[in-house]
Image (tube, rainbow, N blue to C red):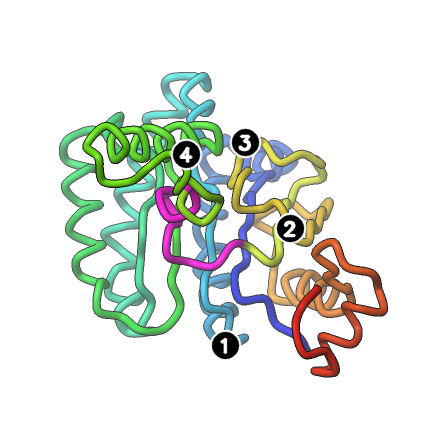
């Protein structure tokens, strides 16, 4: 089966999962952490190179203060609890997003955990926290602007590749498969630039219920799709079969 190199997931539905069971919303988020662990393990087994999970968007600060505080506590707990497991499974952890909005203690722990897994060579797990796709493009534009002002690059050297290198995911492949759980069908400001050619998979399954079978169904859907990147179906088929000298 054709496996995507990079899978990105919007983990939606934790709150609704809890409400359906008469539980507080934080119980759904705690259940969602367990699903994250299972998804990481399945990604390792499947040979996926990069898994990017949308944990906390820049818009999520608008949620009730109590829920935000509990989410920050849960984030810290997950970092502390999972780092040894990540190292044992050779998983490199990267936190992408504007971490300056977090507490000093959480920022320090983010740095420490990333350093602890920096030498891992297996799956790269990217957790998007206080992340927004528009923020990502803006901060890339600012970095490029600074390089132009410093005379390090010329304006005509600003290409798509140059912008991609300055994004928070710079150096990693763009998502091949973009999954959103929970029934909503929108991108919600997640990896907007990077997902230009991603195959999008929406499912009604709430994130805590996104088990191995549900993940496998998403991977099977991806494997059955033809990725044309602007080519005709015949051109894509020939290239996939190695029958074209160069991509068109």
- The residues bearing labels 4 and 2 have C-alpha atoms spaced at a distance of 18 Å
**Where is residue 6 shown, x and y percent of the image?**
52, 61
- The residues bearing labels 4 and 3 have C-alpha atoms spaced at a distance of 10 Å
**Residue contact between numbered discs 3 and 2, judged by CB atoms under 8 Å:** no
Q: Which residues are drawn in magenta? A: 163-174
Residue 169 or residue 206, whichever sits in front: 169
**Crowd around label 3: few <14 · some 14–19 · many ≥20 (10 Å):** some
Residue shown at the point (51%, 61%) measured from the top left: 39
Residue at image mark 3: 189
**Crowd around label 4: few <14 · some 14–19 · many ≥20 (10 Å):** many
Pick whichever of labels 1 and 3 is earlier in the sequence. Answer: 1
Pick whichever of labels 3 and 2 is earlier in the sequence. Answer: 3
Residue 1 or residue 36, whichever sits in front: 1
- The residues bearing labels 4 and 1 have C-alpha atoms spaced at a distance of 30 Å
Question: Which image quadrant: the C terminus?
Answer: bottom right
Which of discs 4 and 3 lies nearer the camera? The answer is 4
**Crowd around label 1: few <14 · some 14–19 · many ≥20 (10 Å):** few
Pick whichever of labels 2 and 1 is earlier in the sequence. Answer: 1
Q: Is residue 133 above or below residue 65?
A: below
Pick whichever of labels 4 and 2 is earlier in the sequence. Answer: 4
Residue 109 lies in what quarter of the image?
top left
Residue at image mark 2: 197
Q: Which mark is residue 45?
A: 1
Queried whether the magenta region covers residue 235, the answer comes back as no
Q: Which mark is residue 136?
A: 4
Q: Is residue 119 above or below residue 159?
A: below
């Amino acid at each position: 089966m054709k496996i995507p190199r990079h899978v990105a997931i919007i983990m939606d539905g934790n709150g609704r999962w809890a409400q359906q069971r008469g539980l507080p919303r934080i119980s759904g988020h705690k259940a969602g952490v367990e699903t994250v662990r299972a998804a990481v393990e399945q990604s390792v087994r499947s040979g996926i190179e990069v898994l990017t999970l949308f944990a906390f968007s820049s818009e999520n600060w608008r949620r009730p203060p109590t829920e935000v505080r509990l989410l920050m506590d849960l984030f810290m707990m997950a970092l502390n609890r999972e780092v040894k497991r990540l190292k044992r499974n050779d998983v490199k952890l990267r936190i992408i997003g504007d971490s300056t909005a977090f507490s000093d203690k959480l920022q320090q722990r983010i740095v420490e955990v990333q350093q602890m897994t920096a030498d891992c060579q297996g799956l790269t797990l990217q957790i998007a926290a206080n992340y927004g796709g528009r923020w990502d493009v803006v901060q890339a534009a600012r970095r490029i602007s600074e390089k132009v002002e410093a005379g390090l690059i010329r304006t005509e050297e600003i290409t798509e590749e140059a912008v991609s290198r300055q994004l928070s995911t710079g150096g990693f492949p763009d998502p091949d498969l973009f999954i959103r759980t929970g029934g909503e069908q929108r991108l919600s400001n997640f990896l907007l630039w990077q997902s230009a050619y991603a195959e999008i998979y929406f499912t009604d399954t709430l994130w805590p219920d996104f088990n191995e079978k549900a993940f496998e169904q998403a991977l099977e859907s991806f494997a059955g799709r033809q990725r044309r990147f602007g080519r005709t179906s015949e051109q894509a088929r020939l290239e996939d079969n190695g029958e074209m000298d160069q991509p068109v």
